[in-house]
Image: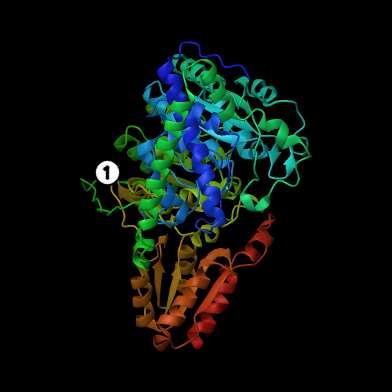
């Protein structure tokens, strides 16, 4: 192995050695602790340390790095306190996730690190967003994100590289090619010789380096970073290496061919760099022993502090409180009494425009939302007012764009992502469920992202443009969900969602866009999140609903001459338990109505809660009505049969007569 020091001083070479040796010695200690049962799992990076250390040394301290399982050297080179690192591994309170996640599933804003999740690909899209923030601010910084060769088989890899290339983002993608995805060899993962063949297909500069050569990795990352600072552009660097131990210790290495580990042990990054320094007389055996002793003492001191820390004190209240970034909404009234007649679609557009004016860095992203104005024309004229940098047409890649939105949030920039149709959110499901929803609870990073979801049937658009999918997310802690039924609430709730630095799904019924209008304030205003609205008062029974259901309930109770309370939930997470309880105690008969399918719908949760907490106030069973438990059909007659309107009439009469 040849080492090219270039202009590096002896002092720098020695410092590099200390950084390289530290994660190796920590690993050796962790393997002992694992056998003793003092930690529960370990993902070894032994044999791959040069990639982590070389990369971290090449990046500036305030540039973000997004590491993976085998990147202990990133964390140690960024000088994370060892006692906190060990507390993290032990599930102690001073660990970065406070016992909520394990191993390297954590980030630290102070150290400019963004923690991974077990789903390997989403990190890449987040890096795009962090890099986009750098580009928008023109601050000449780069971002570095890791992927393994196995993880690069995921669609997120393609999406992130494509977005980075199209938008010319200052991000370095590092592929740690250790030739195995757990037990699966490379020839069963992909059918190409090298990842250097991938880059040109995306229009990305690419380079392959010896990942076991510390200086080669360092120089490659340094050069890529300097290039990025001269001209915004992405870079792909493939680091060839080998994983000496199992994917994690329990999996072992029996699947490796005989002799392969012996062959790679000759390329050990620590031994080879150490021998180079000894040959260059930068290191002596005595100095080596002293350095090793100092590091071992630091490790033992860190372990002592972590071991002395008591087990976590369990607090259910804290678990709930940490779901969201702290935010206390202050409802804003319009400055004047001036009102204008606005359709639902125009109210949404107004809400976005006024929020863009209020937050000068806020970014909108979505397919065709630029000069075309989106398929529903909600952002028409926005490019002319705010520019293409802030109103961004995206490639067709929901996961990378949602990840980019989270990356912007990490940089303190608000964003809105438009799903062209709510149905398409499936392609970004992982980012919402596992990143946006969990990141604050895991390690305190908020996700300041609003995802707009044009939803609903009644427009003969078939099963892939008409789904009501709010219940998919209703089950996910860490998200907030709003679903307005009228222009006034649409504008006020959208403003409120954007103000809140937490992740929102904002559902808008497509059939209401141009079918419903009312006079609403011209000025900026907000509507209280989590507060339902009694849109009609009565005494016969209560209809609890939201979205299109509000209009069905008003129409049908009027048609049947039923004197009903109609409660519009408006916010689904959190939902207004007080308002629900109040209407139940008032009428003593309740039906929950929604457009989503019946089984597992939000109505089931409301009905269960009412039955459990207000059984004594009921004069009849809590009833539900919803769409059929089938996909949404295309033909108008089939679609009307699918929707609950006619069945709702029958159910209302049954409830009234009970």
Q: How many marks?
A: 1
Taking the spot 41% from the left edge, 27% from the top edge, the residue there is 134
Quarter placement of the N terminus = top right
Q: Residues within 10 Å of mark 1 (few under 14, many from 20)?
A: some
What SS does tag 1 mark? loop
In depth, the one of 22 and 417 nearer the eye is: 22
Residue 43 location in percent, x, y? 57, 46
Is 179 positioned to the left or the right of 594 in the image?
A: right
Give the residue number, with chain letter if any, for mark 1.
523
Residue 469 location in percent, x, y? 56, 57
Taking the spot 38% from the left edge, 28% from the top edge, the residue there is 61
Judging from the image, the colouring scheme is rainbow
Is 358 positioned to the left or the right of 383 in the image?
A: left
Which image quadrant is residue 642 in?
Answer: bottom right
Residue ranking furthest to the front: 286
Q: Could you tell me if residue 455 is visible in this image?
A: no
Is 383 positioned to the left or the right of 154 in the image?
A: left
190 w.r.t. 435: above or below: above
Residue 348 location in percent, x, y? 41, 45
In depth, the one of 501 and 261 nearer the eye is: 261
377 w.r.t. 500: above or below: above
Which image quadrant is residue 576 in?
Answer: bottom left
In depth, the one of 597 and 279 nearer the eye is: 279
Residue 30 location in percent, x, y? 52, 48
In depth, the one of 257 and 506 nearer the eye is: 257
Taking the spot 51% from the left edge, 70% from the top edge, the residue there is 603
516 w.r.t. 585: above or below: above
Residue ranking furthest to the top: 7
Q: Could you tell me if residue 98 is visible in this image?
A: yes
């Amino acid at each position: 192995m040849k080492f090219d020091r270039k202009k590096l001083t002896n002092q720098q070479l020695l410092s590099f050695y200390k950084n390289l040796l530290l994660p190796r010695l920590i690993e050796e200690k962790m393997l002992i602790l694992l056998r003793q049962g003092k930690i529960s799992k370990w993902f070894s990076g032994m044999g791959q340390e040069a990639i982590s250390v070389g990369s971290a040394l090449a990046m500036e301290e305030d540039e973000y790095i997004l590491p993976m399982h085998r990147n202990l050297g990133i964390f140690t080179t960024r000088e994370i306190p060892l006692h906190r690192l060990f507390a993290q591994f032990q599930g102690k309170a001073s660990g970065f996730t406070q016992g909520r996640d394990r191993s390297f599933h954590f980030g630290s804003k102070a150290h400019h690190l963004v923690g991974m999740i077990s789903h390997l690909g989403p990190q890449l899209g987040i890096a795009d967003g962090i890099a986009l923030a750098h580009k928008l601010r023109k601050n000449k910084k780069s971002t570095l994100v890791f992927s393994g060769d196995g993880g690069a088989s995921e669609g997120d890899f393609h999406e992130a590289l494509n977005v980075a290339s199209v938008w010319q983002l200052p991000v370095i993608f590092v592929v740690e090619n250790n030739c195995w995805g757990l037990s699966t060899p490379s020839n069963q993962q992909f059918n190409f010789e090298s990842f250097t063949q991938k880059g040109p297909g995306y229009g990305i500069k690419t380079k392959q380096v010896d990942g076991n050569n510390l200086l080669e990795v360092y120089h490659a990352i340094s050069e890529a970073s300097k290039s990025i600072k001269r001209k915004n552009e992405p870079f792909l660097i493939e680091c060839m290496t080998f994983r000496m131990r199992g994917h994690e210790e329990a999996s072992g290495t029996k699947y490796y061919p005989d002799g392969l580990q012996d062959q790679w042990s000759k390329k050990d990054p620590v031994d080879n760099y150490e021998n180079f320094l000894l040959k260059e007389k930068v290191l002596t055996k005595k100095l080596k022993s002293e350095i090793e002793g100092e590091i071992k003492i630091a490790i033992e001191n860190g372990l002592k502090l972590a071991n002395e820390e008591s087990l976590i004190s369990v607090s259910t209240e804290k678990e709930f409180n940490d779901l969201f970034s702290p935010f206390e909404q202050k409802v804003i009234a319009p400055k004047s009494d001036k009102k204008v007649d606005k359709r639902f679609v125009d109210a949404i557009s107004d809400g976005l425009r006024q929020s863009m004016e209020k937050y000068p860095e806020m970014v909108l992203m979505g397919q065709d939302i630029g000069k075309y104005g989106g398929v529903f024309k909600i952002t028409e004229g926005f490019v002319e007012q705010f520019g293409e940098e802030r109103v961004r047409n995206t490639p067709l890649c929901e996961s990378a764009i949602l990840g980019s939105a989270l990356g912007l949030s990490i940089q303190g920039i608000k964003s809105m992502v438009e799903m062209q149709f709510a149905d398409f959110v499936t392609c970004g499901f992982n980012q919402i469920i596992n990143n946006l929803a969990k990141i604050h609870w895991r390690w305190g990073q908020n996700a300041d992202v609003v995802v707009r979801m044009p939803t609903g049937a009644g427009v003969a658009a078939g099963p892939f443009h008409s789904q009501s999918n709010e219940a998919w997310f209703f089950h996910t802690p860490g998200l907030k969900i709003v679903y307005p039924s009228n222009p006034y609430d649409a504008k006020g709730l959208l403003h409120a969602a954007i103000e809140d630095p937490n992740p929102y799904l904002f559902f808008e019924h497509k059939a209401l866009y141009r079918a419903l209008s009312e006079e609403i304030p011209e000025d900026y205003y907000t509507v209280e999140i989590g507060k339902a609205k009694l849109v009609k008062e009565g005494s016969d029974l209560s209809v609890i609903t939201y979205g299109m259901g509000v209009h069905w309930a008003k129409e049908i109770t009027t048609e049947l001459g039923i004197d009903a309370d109609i409660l519009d939930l408006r916010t689904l997470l959190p939902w207004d338990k007080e308002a629900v309880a109040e209407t139940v105690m008032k009428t003593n008969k309740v039906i929950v109505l929604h457009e989503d399918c019946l089984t597992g719908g939000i109505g089931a949760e409301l009905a269960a809660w009412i039955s459990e907490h207000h059984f004594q106030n009921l004069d009849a069973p809590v009833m539900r009505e919803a769409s059929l438990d089938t996909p949404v059909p295309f033909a108008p007659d089939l679609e009307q049969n699918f929707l609950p309107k006619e069945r709702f009439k029958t159910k209302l009469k049954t409830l009234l007569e009970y």
